[in-house]
Image: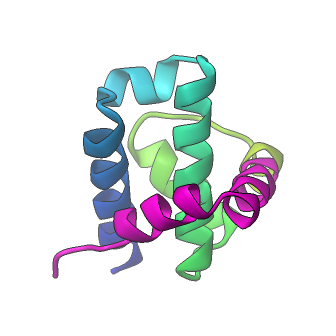
Amino acid sequence: MKEYIFKQYLDNILEHMDISLEDFFENNMMSVVNARQILYYMCNERGMGAYDIQNYLSRQGYSVSHSTILHGIKKAKEIIDNDKDYKYIVNKLKEIEA
């Protein structure tokens, strides 16, 4: 069930930020890094731990360390806590279809 939520969040982020799945996992531009960090944060807020997120990413063909996920969650939280517009957008991205 959580993997379904992960995939919905990923799709929402890709669509909103106009990023391809390939770029999401291969590109290291700051906007793409931020998108990945938002995904980590959103998943974590939904009760997924870093190991769960790491596992779901691995199933998508993306390898990332546990510490990178934790760092990304922290960075995204800092941005969201300090920018009400960013917070609004992230809350919209959390909306999923059942």
Foreground of the two, 39 or 30: 30
Residue 45's spot in the image, x, y percent?
A: 60, 77
Left or right: where 12 falls relative to 90? left
Q: Quadrant of the N terminus?
A: bottom left
Q: Choose top left, top right, bottom left or bottom right for residue 22.
A: top left
Identify whether 37 is placed above or below 45: above
| Magenta residue check for 67 | no
| Magenta residue check for 79 | yes
Q: Residue at x 38, y 41 (%)?
A: 60
Q: Residue at x 52, y 54 (%)?
A: 39
Foreground of the two, 45 or 55: 45
Left or right: where 25 falls relative to 34? left
Tell me the colour scheme of the image: rainbow
Residue 33's spot in the image, x, y percent?
A: 61, 32
Residue 55's spot in the image, x, y percent?
A: 54, 56
Left or right: where 9 falls relative to 66? left
Identify whether 26 is placed above or below 45: above
Q: Which residue is outermost to the front?
A: 84
Q: Quadrant of the C terminus?
A: bottom left
Residue 11's spot in the image, x, y percent?
A: 27, 50
Foreground of the two, 7 or 9: 9
Name the main secondary structure of what is drawn in magenta. helix
Left or right: where 16 falls relative to 46? left
Q: Residue at x 78, y 50 (%)?
A: 75
Identify whether 77 is placed above or below 24: below
Q: Choose top left, top right, bottom left or bottom right for residue 73.
A: bottom right
Instruction: Specify start and end residues of the magenta stretch as a single range.
Output: 71-98
